[in-house]
Image: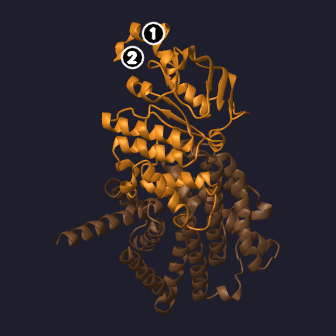
Chain colours: A brown, B orange
Amino acid sequence: MRGTSLRPLWGWGLLALGLGGFPLLASEFYIRLATEILIMALFAMSFNLLLGYGGMLSFGHAGFYAVGAYTVAILMKKTSVPFFLAFPAAPAVTALVAAVTGYFCVRLRGFYFSILTLAFGQLIWGVIFKWSALTEGDDGIVGIRAPTFLTSSGGSYYFTLVLTAACIGLLWMIIESPFGRTLLAIRENTDRTQFIGVDVNRLRLLAFVLSATFAGVAGALFAPFNGSVFPTFALWTKSGEVVMMSILGGMHTFLGPAVGAAIMLSLDQMISVYTEYWPFVLGVILLVLVLFFPAGITGFVRVLARRESAGTRLA
Amino acid sequence: MLLETQGLRKAFGGVQAVSNVDLAVLEGDVHALIGPNGAGKTTFFNLLTGSLRPDTGRIDFGGREITALPPQQICRMGIARSFQRASIFPKLSAFENVRVSVLAHEGKSFRLYPRANALARGEVESLLETVGLSDQADQPGESLSHGDRKRLELGIALANRPKLLLLDEPTAGMSPDETRSTMSLVQRLARERGITVLFTEHDMTVVFGIAQRVTVMHQGQVIADGSSEAVRENREVQRVYLGEAGWFWR
């Protein structure tokens, strides 16, 4: 027991050191790429609370990401609310929107749940697209002025790193809590969970709202980082991205979706230098992965590690 | 009287699965519900636990009406159940299977803090010991043998500290040894913890071995009800079983 609990501690220490020291060594371009990876990692991990831990495949998660991003954008550009107030408002507004849409979604199971989340996600996109007076419609809201400490790529990176790490810590706490364990039970056997006296729909709703709230934080981080927000943030293809990141990285590992986000964004940068058919390459990678490594990359690494430790035990 | 149903009916299409059933379960009894396949026993259980709504009739438990309440509320009032095919949480360890139920009973399922690991340890361990699964505590539910899964499900049900335990064929598919130890466990629970048990079972040695009262269902209706001696001597029961299948007196 002691040995297994110490080793991850080392791992976390190294990760913290690497992430903390990264901007000192890397160029502007890579610092910005890393910042984007952190934001997408948080977005994907928030989504995976539903998919990997709750067994709920949402196809509308980008809707909440967009609500977070637009809340910051609208408050800062349209009402000149300062950033330090607009930023926390984003998860609050997202939670509210998720509570309303989730109320309907969590009543449905499986496939029907997925379709309704897709519908609500597209509805959010539609509202953003059409309500030009508030959202500037298709033009998006451009020229969001981040506070001075966020204008440098380093400052923006560290701000994102601290918030992402804090949110991931909270997600970890949630997963390890009685609530998180009960959510796993619902994933495993929804009916049985009712018969131990748990109000399944209420618990699923709480999971839905928590998951959306963290997606809202990710959106709120992206808005000042990007300087502009567009309706495409809410589009179902954006929702598809986090589904792919989770599957690619491994949805049954805590950090799996973050690994998926890092790989997808890095590949995007690398491959699109050579070919404009990057989605084709991504398609092939996903195909191979789903067929041969259904547990995702982290799942595969875990199997390898287990095999190795079994080997040393034998030797 | 702990549980009472009056005029309970449930039809699927044109079939009366449960037809005008009046049943009373006395507090502290081990009560068997028997009948040939398709007699309506499982449907009756599903009505009692809220998985199905009755077409007509009412159910009272501990002096309160529970007709058509949702399953989680009925469970919280003190009725726990097991299923014909053991229903567990396959990927969770035996320990976690029971813990999730203990946490639910303690009203902590919605807590976001502290870690579940810090809670309910002792209670879970003693429950696993009660059902004889201490050695398999870390095994995933899906890797347990058939008999152990059934015992695990019993542990999950007991974690709710029920007043009434509904067991749907608790020994189905078990070896004679497993059957004996499971039923003596059920008997012990009834005696030591004062849990009332209502169970269905096909094995008549088991039924008449531990039940104080027996109710016989046939084609959705109760055709006999009484002490196990009285039911054993009942002519109609003999006719139904001997006429259709010889297994009753096997």
Please identify the quarter of the rendering in which residue A134 is found. Answer: bottom right
Point out residue A278 in the picture as x, y percentages from the top left corner: 42, 65
- Work out whether residue A140 can be spotted: no
Total number of numbered discs in the rendering: 2
Kind of element beneath mark 2: helix
Look at the picture and state if B26 lies above or below A235. Answer: above
Q: Residue at x 63, y 43 (%)?
A: B72
- Work out whether residue A37 can be spotted: yes
Q: Is residue B134 left or right of residue A35?
A: left
Check whether the beta carbons of the residues at disc 2 and disc 1 lie within 8 A of each other. no
Q: Amino acid at mark 1?
A: Val
Q: Residues within 10 Å of mark 2 (few under 14, many from 20)?
A: some
What is the spatial separation of the Cα atoms under label 2 and label 1, in whole angstroms? 9 Å
Residue B248 disc label: 2
Specify the quadrant that holds the C terminus of chain B: top left
Point out residue A75 in the picture as x, y percentages from the top left corner: 78, 71
Q: Residue at x 45, y 82 (%)?
A: A15
Which residue lies under the disc numbered 1? Answer: B240
Q: Amino acid at mark 2?
A: Phe
* Callout 2: chain: B
Kind of element beneath mark 1: helix
Residue most extreme to the bottom: A24
